[in-house]
Amino acid sequence: MAPGARTGQTAAVLLMLSTTHRPATDLGFLLHKNPARAQQVEVSTGTAHVFYPEATDDRCTVVLLLEVDPIALVRGKGDGEGFALGQYVNDRPYAASSLLAVALGKVFASARRGVSKERPELADTPLPLEVHLPALSCRGGAELAERFFGPLGWRVQATELPLDGRFPEWGASRHVDLRLTGTHRVADAVNHLYVGLPVLDGAKHYWVSADEIDKLLRAGEGWLAAHPERELIAARYLAHQKRLTGTALARLAEVDDAEVLDDAPEVTDPPTPLAQLAQLRQGAVLAALRSAGAHRVLDLGCGSGALLPALLAEPSFTEVVGVDVSARALELAARRLRLDRMPERQRARLILLQGALTYTDARLAGYDAAVLMEVVEHLDPDRLPALEHAVFTAAAPATVLVTTPNVEHNVRYPALAAGGMRHRDHRFEWTRAEFTDWAQGVAGRRGYAVRFLGIGPDDPEVGPPTQLAVFDRGVAA
Ligand code: SAH
């Protein structure tokens, strides 16, 4: 096919997504596109075609083919994607790129939300997937494709296409034949591509506006905050507009600890993978709550809700209150909990409140227990007395559980051995002695007894990775 951008010919770019998870044709339910029926969708950049060249129980492949309309591109269709500035011709119609991402976003909008009426569980299940983009515009070449998709858990095969320089109008762009193999939820895979294509393309200069931040964060939910290249991704996705990039990164930094730590590939290796540590921490907190006989429980600094589902899963916790200062975190929590689809009886046991733990708050008084899981280290040390007063004297639950990293253990994580902290929003991390000191001081001043437990393997030299203090009121000496 000859380059046709200057002549107004249409051209096509395509993406293939396959699964071998049996029955593979269920892919159609997850994509909300029937394998038996080819479909056409008009998008701002041309016409998108969706069809299945193979659809058997063993293997199912969907093709998204975008027929680019260069005239529409140059004129801009003004449908909100903002192509009015599309005065460019070079390689656009030929390479899977930002334009394909726009089509992908629209055609698979429901799939990207991860919901499927017919196969709700499958939508939540990571499936073996393959993606093939035969001609991906990739200004960073194969190496950038690896840097983007590798940390997300994809096996990346990127072969540079020897096209460059053949067509002067393609300018300096480079192209790769990209194959990805991995096990992902279909929604996650589509969102990886939705963000990845324009990031690799690096030419998304024409549609960037403030609501792109929302699109990026929505598509990046659950993976972008932990991505080692998040700065590069945000900058390229937002076309290097410093103000937008700064806002996006600030909002990403609000995403809680658990999410960042659990997924961060550079620190998940030895000796206790952090994802596993998060599980252990949750288990320890639940066990302490049960043994305290708590029924009405506060999760203070609940973040995006790492603990809330486990609390709601136990009917003995009759009231569960998640509190966080970050509205964004609470929004993520509501989404994680699928609040809109939660059974009424469970919904009635849950309250989400926005509030700062450094101010007394009458809504928090009178509970059986409060959990501060990985929260205190997010406060500036000079705010700790305010938190101490608000939690232990004003709210004054019978039991308070506080977990925090044991900084001594960081030497066991190679990525942290040089003195790094476990999360970039941590204001401090304590040794066992420092935590004990603080907790005993609080207990003494506020009328609680305190005992200490380790979470994770108790290393003979540096102690456990996480420390837990259990405060009980009423049994103080
Ligand atoms: N407990 C969760 C989240 C820990 S991250 C978990 O274990 O996964 C710390 C959380 O504390 C963040 O969501 C942050 O927004 C919240 N936070 C920090 N300072 C706060 C304050 N002063 N008041 C209320 N929440 C605060």
Image: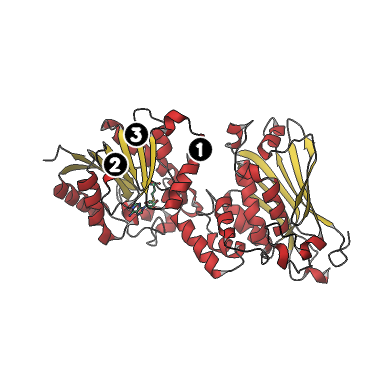
- Cα–Cα gap, marks 1 and 2: 26 Å
User: Can residue 20 be seen at all in this image of the molecule?
Assistant: no
Q: Tag 3 or tag 1, which sits nearer the N-term?
A: 3
Three-letter amino acid code at the position of disc 2: Ala
> Percent x, y for residue 470?
24, 41
Q: Nearer the viewer, residue 466 or 365?
A: 365
Mark identifier at residue 319: 3
Mark identifier at residue 135: none
Q: Residue at x 43, y 51 (%)?
A: 327
Q: In the image, is 317 to the left or to the right of 156?
A: left
Q: Are marks 1 and 2 in contact (CB under 8 Å)?
A: no
Q: Which residue is mark 2?
A: 370
Three-letter amino acid code at the position of disc 1: Asp
Q: In the image, is 473 to the left or to the right of 280?
A: left
> Percent x, y for residue 31?
68, 40
Three-letter amino acid code at the position of disc 3: Glu
Position of the C terminus by quadrant: top left
Q: Secondary structure at mark 1?
A: helix
- Cα–Cα gap, marks 2 and 3: 12 Å
